[in-house]
Amino acid sequence: MKRLLASAIVLCALLSAAPVAACVPGGFMDPVVYWTQAVKTDSLLGVCPSGDWSGIEVTLYDLCAMPVAGKEVVLTLADGRVCDSPVTAITDMYGHAHVVVKLGLNSSAGTARVGSAYSLTCMGLTIRTGTASLVSPDYNCNQSVDALDFSFFALDWLPAAYAARSDFNDDKVVDALDFSIFALHWLHSN
Ligand SMILES: [Ca+2]
Ligand SMILES: [Ca+2]
């Protein structure tokens, strides 16, 4: 009987205890964000329709230091010449997501590089904003690296005027090294 009474007292105490407040996300605790395979830190990025060039890694913890799992991370590149933006990824149980940047670029209007503001968000909260220049072997935004794109590259090959859009390794000249990078992405598509 005493044991039953003690159990009832414990149960009553548990039921009457103040509920533990849930951690309502109002932000993220020290988010880890970095670009992978950037041509030049995070100021010059390479984008391919297949997503095998620059990407972004993000790891998120909420304000209670718990991993933000199963949430959509959204990378938006705002410039209209970037095709198929935004791209998204879902965080895993550790709060980590790799955003594959499967994008084309319309750089057919001139030989300058396309620049774009970008933002990374999750649950409507901004994680990072910035600007970056972009290069892509897809020059005409048809989400395929094909013969038409090669014709743009050939136009830029060692001309008198520097064609930054085809300088894929950022060494200030369009030469065989850039062609080798173009060839790596040949026939890639989304
Ligand atoms: Ca193309
Ligand atoms: Ca180059």
Image (cartoon, rainbow, N blue to C red):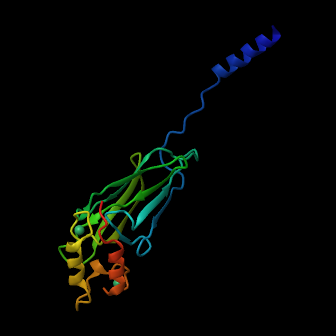
The quadrant in which the N terminus is found is top right
**39 is higher (above) or lower (below) than 163:** above
- Quarter, ligand 2: bottom left
Q: Quadrant of residue 21?
A: top right
Which residue is at the far left?
Answer: 109
Query: Is 59 left or right of 170, judged from the image as shown?
Result: right
User: Where does the image place residue 126, in percent across and percent down from the top left?
Assistant: 41, 53
**94 is higher (above) or lower (below) than 83:** above
Q: Quadrant of residue 144?
A: bottom left
User: Where does the image place residue 134, in percent across and percent down from the top left?
Assistant: 32, 71
Q: Residue, x 26% and y 83% (percent of image)?
A: 163
Front residue of 90/31: it is: 90
Q: Residue, x 24% and y 79% (percent of image)?
A: 153
Question: From where the camera sits, is residue 172 visible?
Answer: no
Q: Residue, x 47% and y 60% (percent of image)?
A: 57
Query: Is 169 left or right of 14, judged from the image as shown?
Result: left
